Amino acid sequence: MKPTKGRVWELLLGLAILTLVVCGVPVFRSAVLAQGWESNIRAFEKQDQVNPPKAGSIVFTGSSSFVRWESLSEDMKPLPVINRAFGGSEYTDVNEYAARTVIAYHPPAVVVYAGDNDLAAPGPNTPQSVAKQVQRFVEIVHAQLPGTWIYVLSIKPSYLRWDAWPRMKEANQLIKDYVRTQQRVEYVDVATPMFMGQEKPPRDFFVEDGLHPTAKCYALWASILKPVLMRRFGPKASSQLSFGGNPDEATGIRALIAR
């Protein structure tokens, strides 16, 4: 008996679904999530039309650990910065939108934080694949902006994702090894100092979810990252400045963290 036209369509639909299940789920998932982030990127672009960012600003991009850094502009003064991070993103997403969140601004430097979501749970991502995505990010940025400096922050430890920390630690080492081979790329380790010499980071480095940083943790990050940026992008008269114009500021922040 010959199948009816309706039956043929049912078979074709079933075959399409099976194809997605067997080999296309990551692509389908990526497409769905990309649509969600597209609205974030368009919001950035609309914001730029209303309030154009200052030329020469350093771009911060990546996932929610940067999105939630509400004191970023204040913490980085006198360096001008633009925050173009979007929560939930992985390195593949950061790479997909790099043209619009990084290259469009022609920044002297870009600071990126991602990899946290990539290795959060068992899945297709591995320390090796994350390191490859970091390499891809560098290639994308330097293909268009060869003079731009790229600062890659290490993946942070957290209580919520403590089981994934061994994979994250391995990824950090691979990223660090790769960065050493590149020009105008620097690895910034914020993970190791977060342990404060203990087996785990202090609990008050994280908000209630055990994942995202508190103001205290961001103060630590700023005390590590800002001097690195200031050495290269601070005011020309900064030879007498230690940390944002106040020689005692870095010491003060470290004292705050130690409380």
Image (tube, rainbow, N blue to C red):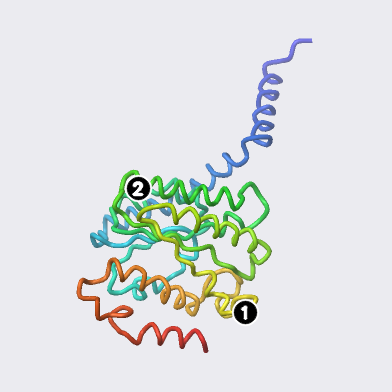
Where's residue 58, x and y in %? Answer: 32, 62
User: Relative to 161, is 178 above or below?
Assistant: above
Earlier-in-chain disc, 2 versus 1: 2
Q: Are marks 2 and 1 in contact (CB under 8 Å)?
A: no
Q: Quick one: SS at disc 2? A: helix
Where's residue 54, x and y in %? Answer: 24, 62
Q: Residue at position x 57%, y 54% from top?
A: 118
Question: Any mark on residue 198, and which?
Answer: 1
Q: Which residue is mark 2?
A: 142
Q: Is residue 64 left or right of residue 228?
A: right
Residue 230 visible in the picture:
yes
Crowding at dot 1, Cα within 10 Å, few <14 / some 14-19 / many 20+, comes out as few
Where's residue 179, x and y in %? Answer: 45, 55
Q: Going by the picture, which residue comes out furthest to the top?
A: 1
User: Relative to 65, is 40 above or below?
Assistant: above
> Which quadrant of the view contains residue 224?
bottom left
- Taking depth in this image into account, of 105 and 86 the one nearest to the observer is 105
- Amino acid type assigned to the residue bearing label 2 in the image: His
Q: Give the Cα distance between marks 2 and 1.
A: 38 Å
- Amino acid type assigned to the residue bearing label 1 in the image: Gln
Q: Residue at position x 34%, y 75% from top?
A: 74
Total numbered labels placed on residues in the image: 2
Residue 51 visible in the picture:
no
Q: Is residue 59 left or right of residue 7?
A: left
Where's residue 199, x and y in %? Answer: 65, 76
Crowding at dot 2, Cα within 10 Å, few <14 / some 14-19 / many 20+, comes out as some
Q: Quick one: SS at disc 1? A: loop
- Taking depth in this image into account, of 30 and 250 the one nearest to the observer is 250
